[in-house]
Image (tube, helix red, strand yellow):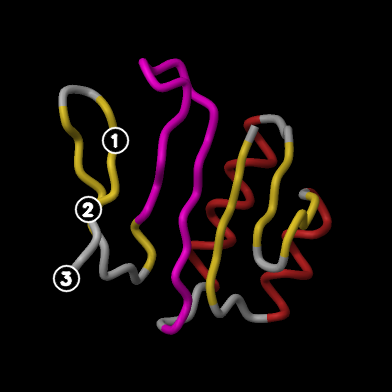
Amino acid sequence: MIVIVGENLPERIKGILKIWLLEVKPSVFVGDINKVIETRILKFLQTYMNSSTDLMIIRSQNTSQGFKIDYPYNSKDKLINVGGIQLIQKSP
C-alpha cells in the first residue's frame, strides 16, 4: 500500500498519479500497487517535482511501524528516527 500526500502538486503530476492511485481528497493519493509500479511512480516523482511542491510518501514495509515514510521533497520539516520509529519534526 502506498499513500502520497502533496501540497502544490502540478496538474500533470496529479493526472499521472490518478492512473494508478485513488485520489481520496485533493492531493491525497492511496493505492495497493505492486513494487514495479511503485518504483515507476517514485522515479517519476523524483524526476518531475518542482521546487514549490511539498510531498510525503508513506509505503508499507516490514518495520516495527509497518510502514516507511519518505519526506525528502522540499519540506521545511525533518524526518527523524527515534528508537527505530520514524517521526516528523516540525520546523519552528
Amino acid under label 1? Gln
Q: Magenta residues, as a range?
A: 52-71
Residue at point 58% right, 53% down?
Answer: 4
Residue 13 percent across, percent down from the top left: 67, 71
Q: Are marks 2 and 3 in contact (CB under 8 Å)?
A: no
Give the residue at mark 1: 86
Q: Residue drawn at (66%, 35%), measured in percent from left and top?
A: 36
Q: Residues within 10 Å of mark 3 (few under 14, many from 20)?
A: few
Residue identifier under label 3: 92
| Amino acid at dot 3 | Pro
Magenta segment includes 5: no
Gap in angstroms between the C-alphas marked 2 and 3: 9 Å
Where is 6 relative to 61, above or below? below
Q: Write the residue at 20% across / 43% down.
A: 80
Element marked by disc 3? loop
Give the class, few, some or many, for how many residues have Cα within 10 Å of label 2's Cα (few <14, many ≥20): few
